[in-house]
Structures are given as C-alpha cells and as structure tokens.
Amino acid sequence: MRVAVVGAGVSGLAAIKCCLDEGLEPICFEQSQDIGGLWRYTVSRRGRPCAPQVPAPVFLPNALFLDYLRRYAEHFNLREHIRFGTTVVSIRKLPDSAITEQWSVVTETGGKQTSHICDAVMVCSGNFSEPSLPLQSFPGIERFRGQYFHSQQYKHPDVFQGKRVLVVAGFLSVSCFTSTTSSQEVTISTTRGAWLLSRVFEHGYPWDMILNTRFMSLIKTNLPAPLSWWLINYKVNQRFNHENYGLQPEKRCFLVREPILNDDLPSYILTGRITIKPGVKEFKDNSVLFHNCPEEEPIDIVVFCTGYIVSFPFLEESMVRVENKHASLYKYVFPTHLQKPTLAVLGLIKPFGAIMPVAEMQARWVSRVFKGLCQLPPQSVMEKEVNEKKKNQVQWFGLTFDEVLKTEWLVYLDTLASFIGAKPSVLGLLFTDPWLALTIFFGPCSPYQFRLRGPGRWEGARQAILTQWDRVLKPMRTRVPAGSSSPFPSLLIVMAFLLLLAAVIFGFQ
Ligand SMILES: Cc1cc2nc3c(=O)[nH]c(=O)nc-3n(C[C@H](O)[C@H](O)[C@H](O)COP(=O)(O)OP(=O)(O)OC[C@H]3O[C@@H](n4cnc5c(N)ncnc54)[C@H](O)[C@@H]3O)c2cc1C
C-alpha cells in the first residue's frame, strides 16, 4: 500500500516511520530542502523528543531538537523515503476509485508537475504556515508610521535593537521571543491575559513530568469545574500573583484559560524590561492608545502574535471543512465522510503537552487503520462526536474559539493507544508488576508507556520507565557532593502508593 505523506516535520517523520513499521510504502513530499518543519529556525524554542528508542535530554533548544530529529531520521532510515524540494499542489480522489479510494497527488519540483497515484494520504503539513493578521481589528493601523509584522516573520532579535516594541496578543509566540529580545522597552498588549507556568516546576522538576501524569489527569478530568478553577488559580498564583503582574485572565469563573509556559516573563516584568497593557484601542502615527489608559505610548515596532489560519490549500474544501479554526475530523485525524478511511491529518491538535508523542501516536493509529487492522466507528457516530467537540465546552481549561483544537493530552493519547491495543493497563499491572504500575500511575507519562504492549512493543520499555528520572536528572546533576541523597524521595513513594489505592477505590478504569 502506497502512502503519500505531505511534509517532513515532526508529524511527517513519525508518519513515515509508522508506515514502515506496518509494512506500508511511504512516499513523503517536503517542499523545503530539509526535515524538521517549524523547528528549523534560528529563534530559540524548546521541546521534547518523541520516540523512546533514541536517547535525548529534557527540553532541547530548537537547534538540538533538530539534531535529534536528524538522528531519528537517520536511525530509522527515513530520508530515503522523502522527496525534498517537492511541493504538494493538489490531492484529489481518483474519479473511478469509489471502492479503492485511490488518490492522485500532484507535486511540483522546480516548476515541473508530476502526478502520483497513492492508496492513502497522511497530511502532515503543519498548522503554523498561514499567519492570521486581522488588521481590521486594530483601528488606525493604516496611519501607523512604524514597522509592523506577524510573529512568523520574526527571525532574529537584532531588529529590536534600541527600539520601543509592542507585542500584541498571543502568548505562545510571545514566550518564544521575549527571552531573546535585545530591546530595552517591550510592551505586551493582552485583552485576555494568561496564566503562566514555569518549565521549572515544583522542586525544580520539569513541569510536564509532574503535571502530565495519570494521577493528575484523573484529577483534572474529574474535579467539578469550580474546584478545578480554584486549584488552577491557587497553583499558578503560587509562583507569583498574576493580578499584581497585570496578567490575570479576564473571565474569572467559567472560561478558564489554559496556562502558557514561560520562565522569564515574570522576571522581565519585575525588572521593568516588559510592561503589560490592556488591548489596543487605536494606533496613532508613532504611538498606541490602550483601552482604559489615557496616555499614548510611543512605539517603533509592532509584532502581531495573532495566530494562524488552519488551511489545506492542496485539498478540496469539502474534504476537510475548517470552520472557526476547527477542522471537522474524527479524533482530530479522519474526515468523517469518506467511504474508506484513506486520508488522515496529523498534528492538527494543540494539547497541553508535547506534540511529538501525540503525532507519533496518531501515526501509529492511522497506519493501522490504513492497513485495515483497526476500524473506525460508523459515520453517524464520528459526526456526532465531531459536532460535540465543536461546541464550546467548559472543561479544565475551558475550550473557546481556536481552543477547540486543544484537548487533554494524556486522555487523548490513551484513547488512541486503546484503539491500537497499546494503552497500558495500570490495574492489571498492579497485580503482576506493582512497582511498574505505581510508576506509570504517579510518574511522568513518557511515551515508553505506550510501548509496553501492543504493536510496536519494545522490550526496553519497562526498564526505561523505571529509570526515566535518572536520565532526566543526569544532565543537571553535574556536581554531586559526597553523600548526596537519592533524587527521588522515598516518602513520595509511600504517599504515591496510598493515593493509588484511593484511586483504585474511586473506580479508575
Ligand atoms: C511558536 C511556537 C512554539 C512551539 N513550541 C512547541 C514546543 O515547545 N513543544 C511542542 O511540542 N510543540 C511546539 N509547537 C508546536 C509545533 O507545531 C510542533 O512542535 C511541530 O512543529 C509540529 O510539527 P508538524 O510536522 O505537524 O508541522 P511543521 O513543523 O509545521 O512541519 C510541516 C512540514 O510540512 C511541509 N509542508 C507544508 N506544506 C507542504 C506542501 N504543500 N508540500 C510539501 N511540504 C509541505 C513544511 O515545509 C514543513 O516542513 C510550537 C509552535 C509554535 C508556532
């Protein structure tokens, strides 16, 4: 079975590998000359590696992460399946393929178009390529004499040297370049505010290794909304009071905003390098007026962190409908109306956790669906679920507007893992391997957990789970004084055991 993969970023690489694992024949088209997608940039970003088989440290800066992806591609011989400098310009179902659902994939290389017949398609083109710049929402921008651009165009901090910079909205991009800016005067304008979480979490552990655990997920998804609101409020304000820093999200009770990871912003605010302001009311020739602020603020450069438009220019509009930034896809992956599930979209999701394990899990599931080893539910069931997702739901993070793409990281991973038989059974393990069960339940949900059983089972998974803290702490514990204690407190283990029993009693699984 020949599978076209569009894009060789994180999702595309996982797609190629999983196709190979299932004995499918991937052919990947990448418009640029290299792998890595969004991670091949000069701006410093930090992320997490995806596959358990290749060792790598925690939170890599983007250059190191790209290096990791290169090693990943080399390790699994992925490059030979990629055609670089080749843009996919159209993907159409072959007219006479009602039964086989074959696809005609038209690509362009150096101005020359070629058509490829494929049995299935994995769209891994990313959702950060078409910037959204709603200038009509910013009165007076046409008379503003300074420079303005979308955050996507930002490549190097030098452009800010000695300038008064205004950053509008969007904290995801803000977090990426505030720490690299060399300007002395930065103002961030935010209408909605944001919760800030530090990567350096409680006791200095990486945030996701503490927050993205099965135990925490159980709490997050089962607590009544007011209680979870209180908990978030309490937790995020422990580091610093968001109200004092001008960051407190507007809506207090119901639409709880998801936290943004940023280590530096509070310290920049504290030292006066960054000032937080409300939403922009109006632009003037060389200044900006904010809501509820009488004084104009002189500004030289405006960076709009106003997000991206989800689009698939090479697909017919009817194939993947995108409304209000929400693509109608079952489990964010499969269009619901195809007779045979032979087209899938990967990476179109914004979970509160690393995207790499998610893209990899999607690719594992999709390749098995393509192969006919996993079935999708009837169309009506899928459509019902997609429509439910579209509605604004008030959950732990409160889903609104573009946030419909966001979902509970671990719950989503578990759902897809259960489709392919790779979800770990904590209860089962409690009887056969209690130590592993405890570590899985209370410890970080690293992707090894999905390699304990099912397709792609890895012999080393158990050992990797039990020793993951050693590897995480090793790069930091570069000076260990004689007689130093174990990095994992034993009291925590006892507590963990008691809590696990409680969780079992309350009917987990
Ligand atoms: C500012 C910012 C910070 C982020 N930080 C993190 C983070 O810390 N951790 C994290 O997990 N995620 C982070 N993300 C999310 C990020 O999107 C993912 O980490 C990851 O890059 C998604 O990979 P992808 O392969 O789906 O898409 P991309 O990385 O966008 O790759 C898509 C690839 O498809 C190619 N392509 C597109 N269209 C075509 C076409 N028509 N034909 C051929 N090739 C095509 C592109 O050239 C590109 O190589 C961040 C995103 C942003 C914007």
Image (cartoon, helix red, strand yellow):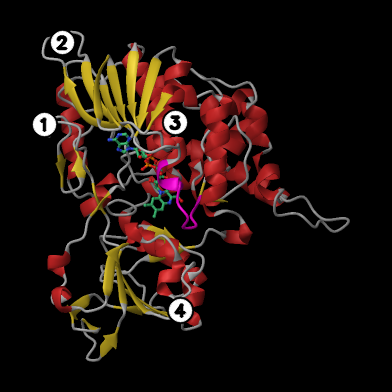
| Dots 3, 1 in contact, CB < 8 A | no
Q: Secondary structure at mark 1?
A: loop
State the residue lying farthest toward the right. Answer: 482
Q: Is the magenta region chiefly helix, strand or loop?
A: loop
Left or right of residue 243, residue 306 in this image: left
Whole-number angstrom distance, CA of label 2 to CA of label 4: 60 Å
Secondary structure, mark 4, is helix
Q: Which residues are magenta?
A: 37-46
Query: Is residue 39 found inside the magenta-colored segment of the image?
Result: yes
Distance from mark 4 CB to nearest ligand 1 atom below 8 Å: no
- Check disc 1 and report the residue beneath it: 318
Q: Is residue 350 above or below residue 235?
A: above
Q: CA distance from mark 1 to mark 4?
A: 47 Å
Count the marks: how many?
4
User: Which amino acid, mark 4?
Assistant: Ile
Give how far across and how far down residue 12 sits, in percent.
Answer: 39, 31
